[in-house]
Image: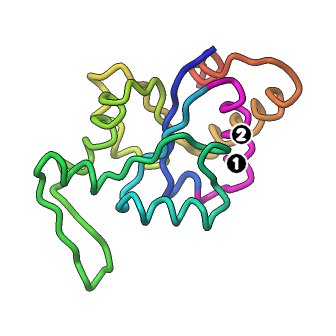
Amino acid sequence: MSGSLSIDFFGTLNNDYGLWTDFLEEIRRDDIKVHIISGPWKSDLIALLENAGFYKDTHYDHVHSILTYLSSIGADTFYDEGYDSWYSTQEAWWSSKAEICKMNGIQIHLDSDIRFSEAFDNIPTRFVHINRLVRDYVDHITHVMELEDVDYQETLMMV
């Protein structure tokens, strides 16, 4: 089996390290390509992932930065020193993950921020909003995958 899945860092991966490290290891064993898509510049995002215990070729295959994507398409991005954060227009920001998924042929995107979901309406990637119920389900299927052969795509589509 092969396929692809993407997942956000802030609010998702960084909220439950143990759950996500186990899950990502299991689905990568089934030749599923894992993409991390989040806001920071790519080098900053890779550092955040490593500091949190997520490693390339163990937990993920590719990292995509919203800021890098927005810069590449010429969207305005700016740094606010007062908040120590980068920003762009609302429309560009909230549609960026869907566009990154579309460009990379990603089948499922997992994210805790529902504001990204609307942009997924007209692309083939399924958006899965991560909440407590979904986390519990991911925990359950991770344990099942550890014990037996499970089709992750079919299982996640049931969410």
Q: Residue at x 75, y 18 (%)?
A: 150
Task: Give residue 41's position: percent from left, percent from top.
Answer: 35, 61
Task: Give residue 1's position: percent from left, percent from top.
Answer: 63, 14
Task: Give residue 5's position: percent from left, percent from top.
Answer: 52, 31
Q: Residue at x 54, y 42 (%)?
A: 130
The quarter holding residue 141 reads top right
Horizontally, residue 5 falls left or right of residue 113, namely: right
The answer to whether residue 129 is seen in the rendering is no
Q: Residues within 10 Å of mark 1 (few under 14, many from 20)?
A: some
Horizontally, residue 76 falls left or right of residue 43, namely: left
Is 20 contained in the magenta span?
A: yes
- Report the coloring of the rendering: rainbow
The quarter holding residue 98 reads top left
Q: Residue furthest front?
A: 57
Is 139 contained in the magenta span?
A: no
Bounds of the magenta segment:
14-31
Pointers 2 and 1 in contact (CB under 8 A)? Answer: yes
Q: Residue furthest right?
A: 147
Question: Between marks 2 and 1, how big is the CA–CA gap?
Answer: 6 Å
Relative to 110, does residue 46 appear above or below in the rendering? below
- Seen from the viewer's position, the closer of residues 17 and 32 is 32
Residue linked to disc 1: 21
Magenta stretch: dominant SS? helix
Q: Residue at x 43, y 66 (%)?
A: 44
Task: Give residue 159's position: percent from left, percent from top.
Answer: 59, 26
Q: Amino acid at mark 2?
A: Glu
Relative to 146, does residue 68 appear above or below in the rendering? below
Residue linked to disc 2: 25
Q: Amino acid at mark 1?
A: Thr
Q: Residue at x 26, y 22 (%)?
A: 122
Q: The residue tagged with tag 1: helix, strand or loop? A: helix
